[in-house]
Amino acid sequence: MSIGASLISLVDPEQQHPPRRGRFGVAIRVELGGDGADGAPASTRNISLEGAFITTRRALRVGEALKLRFWFPGYQVPISIPAEVRWIRPAGQGDNRPAGAGVQFVDPSIAASAAIVGLARLRDDL
């Protein structure tokens, strides 16, 4: 089975509410760090070259700098991407959407950009 074929189950176009330009739904394991707190578990709900929505139970603040480690499918090691929290969605808003934060990537590496573009191309092939 090719890497592309194994990734199809991860891409979920229904996860993006509402759709944003360049974003697509995908669940990727993430580890949150920043302000000395490393290793908080999280997952993406959607992602683009500019940022992502990260579901997490960790309390985050708008403007907080994070070091995110993504376990992209098909990669042997996690890829780190620095990010800044742009907005938050607290738990318990009554609309059944997950708690988390919208983050903006800050100078992502070429490897990070390539991993995201690869997932986006896979989505276009569905």
Image (cartoon, rainbow, N blue to C red):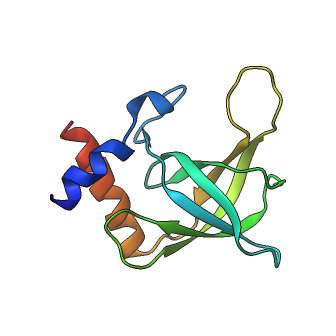
- Residue 47: percent from the left, percent from the top? 48, 48
Say which quadrant the C terminus sits in: top left
Return the residue found at the far top: 95
Taking 8 as reference, is 63 above or below it?
Answer: below
Instruction: Answer above or below: position of 71 versus 18.
Output: below
Q: Residue drawn 58% across and 67% down?
A: 106
In the depicted structure, whether residue 86 falls above or below residue 74 = above
Q: Position of residue 63 (x, y in %)?
A: 78, 58
Res 95 quadrant in image: top right
Quarter of the image for the N terminus: give it.
bottom left
Vertically, is 94 above or below 80? above
Q: Position of residue 17 (x, y in %)?
A: 54, 27
Residue 114: x and y in percent read 32, 66
> In the picture provided, is 114 more to the left or to the right than 105?
left
State the residue in front, 15 or 114. 15
**Numbered circles on residues, count:** 0
Q: Residue furthest front?
A: 1
x 81%, y 26%: residue: 93
Q: Is residue 96 left or right of residue 59?
A: left
Quarter of the image for residue 8 reads top left
Residue at image location 37% in from the left, 58% down from the top = 116
Question: Foreground: 90 or 103?
Answer: 90
The reply, left or right, for residue 125 in relation to residue 58 is: left
